[in-house]
Amino acid sequence: MTTRENVVASRLSKLMLSSGSGSSGGSGNQLPPSSAQVQSPTSPGEQSQSQSELNQIKRDADPQFSRFADYFVICGLDLDTGLEPDRFAGDNLHCSPLDRAYKSKPLAHYPENVPWNPFDAHGICMLSLPQGLRFRTQKHNIEPRFHSFATTREDGKRCYGFSLVFYEEIRNRNICGAIHTLQSMFITELSNGQQTHSLSRVKQDGPVSRSLPRHFKVAGQAPQSAQSYYDINKDKLYVAKSITLICQAPYAFAAQMFLKNLYRCLPRQPGAGISLESYVYNILYEVMLPQQGKSIRVYLPPTEPHLPAIALILQRPLLATELPLLDFPLRLLFKYLGVECVIQLLTCVLLENQVLLRSTDYQRLMIVGECITSLLFPFVWPHVYAPILPAALHHFLDAPVPFVMGLHAECEAAHKIGSEATLCFVDIDKKHIQLPEELPVFPHKMDFMAEIGSVLDKFEIERDRDQEPSFRNGYVGRGAGGGAGGNGSGGPGGVDAMISSCTLPTGLQATRRSKERFQQLQETVYTLSGSPGGGVVDYQPLIAHPSRIDHVPRIADFLRRKGGIRGAGSPVGSPTVSLSSSPVGIYHDVDAVDATMPVSARRSEKQKLSAVDQYYQDLRINNSVREIFLNRFVHMFHAYEYFVIYPNQARDEWISNRETLQNFDKSSFLSDQPEHHRAFLSRFLESQMFATLIDNKILAMWESHPDEQLQLFDQRVKLLRRRHGENMIAATSYEPCVLSQDSQHGFEKRLNCIDIEVTPPSEILANRAAYFRSFPLLEKGVLNQECASSSPPAPPPLGHPSTSSTLSTSPLRNPY
């Protein structure tokens, strides 16, 4: 961490808005304000002092790492240049003009440029409107659609974009006339037989024949053919436009809510509200990213212009003890694909196969790509990563290198996928996966799937259960869906033959009789230590000594009677630490939920969650599931340090020669592993992901600040050795994860103790337009620089929360 970052972190730690946040105990027992409320204002003197310190933090912080968004971009049709064919979309003259892609352009972006992230006009426009510029009529579905995208910069870092695509009515008669003329030419050419070859393609492909009017009789004509016919005298013509945020950190939910609600706040008639520029200025210059281990409350546009802003808490994990940020919901990954398919996909990614995703929804492509690569921790995907591959880059599919790419289902390249031996093809919409040849089985696959399924069940996540294992007579077996698709499964009852001999940890035979007993392995004990009432948590995993598992119920009952653990029905004011408190008071420890509660009742509770509350719940699910995956890698490579071959030369000499040196004793490592795991491990040890981890381990000898992901992984390995002894070499049995609740505590604490609160957006324009017919270009003068005006801001309109009730992070918003 740099000196500047140390100064910022030091000052942030002193600015706790909650009066009880500075104490060591009791913070977990107090329910914070609701997510829709604004905190009570402090005294003018205290607020003025905090205001000056917050302004100093902004000056000290590097804007590259402190700003939520770098750019706000508007892409669409440039009326000055008119219609231009999209040359990257290929030959589309056989399609109706409404089914063709046209060239889109960035109409405006704010600010003009930031030095750490130069504006890429072509790339951002191509990914904001990945299907190009499309025209529609009122007969089409023209609801706004949100999607994310990611790009990899030259330095290897990812940059994220979030785009909302919507359709606006075209009132320009020249554009309407041009579309009408193109359609007339298209119909004339078809009727004259001048497009014989293209017509045959229309008959074969089916859906593209929608472009023909009703009096044309073409075999295979789709019933929706009238949608692709534009009547200039009767139909309204709409064109695609997008608004996009370009960010360094992937806070996907906040970006999605901002863009959707900003579009809803577009004034279409005179009324209360503030200008669009005020919301955009707030997200560009006032909203700060939380530092590691910190949280910040921000305010996003409301669903209606006259409503107050929506409060949302952004948090960032502490990388020294927690997994990195993942804002995309793993809940949806398992809902889309199911547990079986996710494990198969993970195996393909770990072995660095070519992975191609296919869906009709761009956001699904992004969710699957981001989630599956996040589950690789502590390993990092080092190859080509393009979860949304635009038409202009389809030639990348021919590259003979590992990749993770996503294609829209309507593009021609998605229908020409062959059966290459190294290709993993995933159709997300159909829940179908085409695996590479000779794909080995992931170690302890069936037990691994059962553990994941138990956590998903506790969070009531709906998914395809056909291929999930179930517990029958104390053994892990197949569900009702049948086999595993030819990946080493078989034998009686569908049990995986390669792992049927694997058992749960020694001494757990008594707990293998039911799924409820299996879930006891994931419970943890929290006792109080230190001063009386201090609230200091002393974490003790129940799996520390597997031979003592029979004493778990007795210990837990003793601690509850002595007040060491609070039961599900204990009062909030008890002196114990609970993980069940949250900003909205709706979270319950999933292990403490009464098993007798009807499923319908639990589902009805789940349906009551607002979008913000569901976001917090998704973060909890992410943490629980990712800890299970990390636990697998910790058990798989808990002895890897003993096989690292450390160099005896200087750092620079080793770096120049490391491609020719052997850094890991692979043969010795494999000889200590179970035989039925060697097929997977032998191939994974040859991957670039594993080689990078070993390189980072060797580089840690010379670096004062080693790789943070490696440090966390090594820390978890030490915890495992502490439980089983330093001399353990190979774990032949399956041990579930026991640390998920421990890491959950830090997340809950950040939600309850907000470190910084940003002021809600307030008006920055002296005069704002009363209403617009379409999304307008914004005022450059107030958005291209951080200080939009030296004069005090205009008072907020009636119904908007007062800026004096919160602390501001911008000099412009100082109410004093």
Image (cartoon, rainbow, N blue to C red):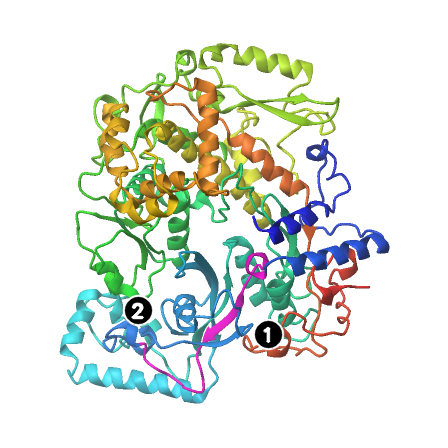
Q: Is mark 1 on a helix, strand or loop?
A: loop
Q: Can residue 368 be seen in this view?
A: yes
Kind of residue indicated by mark 2: Ala
Which residue is the site of mark 2?
392
- Find the magenta span and give its range: 63-86
Q: Is residue 223 above or below residue 7?
A: below
Which residue is the site of mark 1?
784
Which of 291 and 122 lies nearest the eye of the viewer? 291
Q: How far apart are marks 2 and 1 (CA)?
A: 31 Å
Residue 779's quadrant in the figure?
A: bottom right
Q: Quadrant of the C terminus?
A: bottom right
Which of 716 and 89 lies nearest the eye of the viewer? 716
Counting from the top left corner in percent of width and height, residue 418 is at 17, 54
Total tally of numbered discs in the picture: 2
**x 45%, y 85%: residue:** 79
**Left or right of 751 on screen, residue 509:** left
